[in-house]
Amino acid sequence: MKFLKKLALAAGIGGLALTASAANAHLVSFGWKDQGNGTVVLWGEHWHGDQTVASTANGGIHITDTSGTIPTFTAQWSGVLNNRDRDDMLADGTLDGWDLAGNGPTEYMDWFYTVPLVIGNGTWSFFTGTNCCIDTMGNPVIVTLTGITSVPPGTGPGGTNVPTPAALSLLGLGLLSMGYALRRRKQQLL
């Protein structure tokens, strides 16, 4: 009797462990497509098989720029595309690129996609959330978008640019120069 209780307890713990690890891996990759009009569609590949509607459990992709300059933005899933291979999607122009979501190289060929949004090349943190079940992720992942030509690099959702270190340096130099010129002019007037 004690053996059966221990066996049932071990099976329950093992089942919970499998469920918890699976919850971290529902979304396996992200893709993107430049629409050529200043917007990009983001894609999320999941392992739950064919879907008829986009998952709403986590509300889409929560996007944060890695420098922390642009507030987090959420792009809603708006549709599904089932049974499509990543390589075929790259070859036929459905995708401009893709990146793993940290859950291994396995390909499942079922996708959600977002409404078009403004986002440019750069390194972004993507996170769908931990709510069960289809678009679940355990942790945010870093995704590097490339190949987007209709949106300036570093532009985040809402059309705001992430300042580059060079641009910030130039801004600082310009402000210092203006301050020096104003001070000099003030001294000349006295």
Image: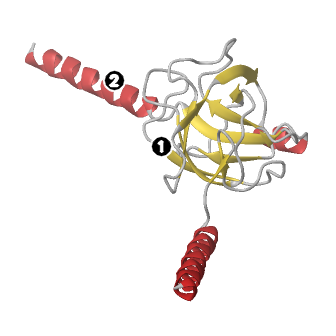
Q: Position of residue 136 (x, y in %)?
A: 49, 28
Q: What residue is pinned by disc 1?
A: 140
From what the image shows, is residue 189 above or below residue 144? below
Q: Pointer 2: residues within 10 angstroms few (<14), some, or many (20+)?
A: few
Q: Residue furthest right?
A: 92
- The answer to whether 44 appears left or right of 88 in the picture is left
Q: Quadrant of residue 152?
A: bottom right
Cα gap from disc 2 to disc 1, whole angstroms: 25 Å
Which one is in front, 47 or 180?
A: 180
Q: Position of residue 119 (x, y in %)?
A: 70, 44
Q: Amino acid at mark 1?
A: Pro
Which one is in front, 53 or 67?
A: 67
* Quarter of the picture holding the N terminus: top left
Q: What residue is pinned by disc 2?
A: 15
Q: Pointer 1: residues within 10 angstroms few (<14), some, or many (20+)?
A: some
**Residue in view at x 65 percent, y 24 percent:** 77
Q: Position of residue 116 (x, y in %)?
A: 75, 31
* Element marked by disc 2: helix
Which one is in front, 187 or 52?
A: 187
**Residue in view at x 15 percent, y 22 percent:** 6
Q: Amino acid at mark 2?
A: Gly
Which is more N-terminal, label 1 or label 2? 2
Task: Please name the colour scheme applied to the rendered image.
Answer: secondary structure
From what the image shows, is residue 167 above or below residue 36? below
* Element marked by disc 1: loop
